[in-house]
Structure formats: C-alpha cells, structure tokens
C-alpha cells in the first residue's frame, strides 16, 4: 500500500514541544534554541501513522478475542470486553482527531490571503 501521508513534511519550526530537563514541556521558541533545533522530534506523519497502527492492532486483538470466546478457546469474558472497549476507545480517539483536522482544514480553506 502506498503511503497516504507521504506528502506531509514538517518544517523544523513546527515540531511539537520536547520535554526539557525534568520532563517539563516547553514550547519551542522559549528557552535555548539549540536544544529545540537538536531535539529531532517525530514528525506529525510518523506520530499519526503510529497511532493508526496501534488502533488497528487493538481492533485485531479485539476481533481475535471475540472469535476465541465464540469458539470456546477463551473463557475470560472480562478480557474480551476489555479488548473490545480498548479498540472502541482507540477508534473514537482517531475519529475525533479526524474531525478536528477537518475543522482546521475548513478554517484554513476559508482564510483570505
């Protein structure tokens, strides 16, 4: 499958904030510039693709758990319910992210230059 987000590239000035010493997040532009430029944080595309993979893995795990419960290979119904809820929550999170991105796109599309 071709990379659907291959066209996304993120300039270094738009990278997400990186944790400073002690795990405290500071927005880029505050503090030392060398630390922000050398941080090399993950791109938006990489983070998004990783979250998509995790949501897909949760869905596969939930499907496998449900199938195992139906065939009798699995007896813990609580585990099946937990796997299903985890997959549902991951899907809802991704759906919410998509909705937010579409709202932002529509807003940018309506900007006058």
Image (cartoon, rainbow, N blue to C red):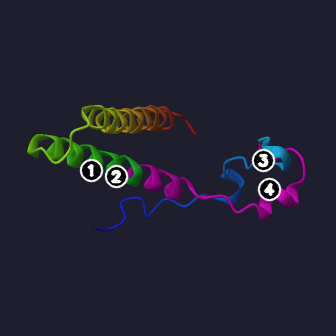
- Is residue 39 positioned above or below 101 on the image? below
- Quarter residue 22 falls in: top right
* Labels 1 and 3: the sequence-earlier one: 3
Residue reaching furthest to the front = 75
- Is residue 72 positioned above or below 46 on the image? above
Asked if the residue under mark 1 is in contact with the one under mark 2, i.e. CB atoms within 8 Å, the reply is yes
SS assignment at label 3: loop
Q: CA distance from mark 2 to mark 1?
A: 5 Å
Residue reaching furthest to the left = 71
Q: Report the mark closest to the observer, 1 or 3.
A: 1
Q: Report the mark closest to the observer, 4 or 2.
A: 2
Crowdedness near tag 1: few (<14), some (14–19) or many (≥20) residues, C-alpha within 10 Å? some
Q: Report the residue marked by disc 1.
A: 60
Q: Report the residue marked by disc 2.
A: 57
Q: Report the mark closest to the observer, 1 or 4.
A: 1
Give the magenta range.
26-52
- Quarter residue 112 falls in: top right
User: Which of 35/56 is in front?
Assistant: 56
Asked if the residue under mark 3 is in contact with the one under mark 4, i.e. CB atoms within 8 Å, the reply is yes
Q: Which disc number belongs to residue 36?
A: 4
Q: CA distance from mark 1 to mark 4?
A: 37 Å
Relative to residue 57, is residue 28 drawn left or right? right
Whole-percent x, y for residue 93 in the image: 42, 35
Q: CA distance from mark 4 to mark 2?
A: 32 Å
* Residue 62 lies within the magenta run: no
* Labels 1 and 4: the sequence-earlier one: 4
């Amino acid at each position: 499958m071709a990379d659907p987000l291959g066209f996304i590239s993120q300039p270094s000035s738009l990278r997400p904030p990186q944790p400073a010493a002690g795990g405290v997040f500071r927005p880029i532009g505050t503090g030392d510039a060398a630390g922000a430029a050398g941080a090399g944080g993950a791109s938006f595309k990489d983070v998004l693709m990783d979250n998509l993979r995790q949501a897909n893995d949760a869905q596969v795990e939930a499907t496998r758990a449900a199938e195992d419960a139906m065939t009798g290979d699995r007896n813990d119904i609580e585990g099946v319910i937990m796997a299903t809820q985890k997959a549902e929550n991951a899907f809802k999170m991704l759906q919410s992210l998509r909705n937010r991105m579409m709202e932002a796109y529509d807003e940018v599309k309506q900007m006058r230059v």
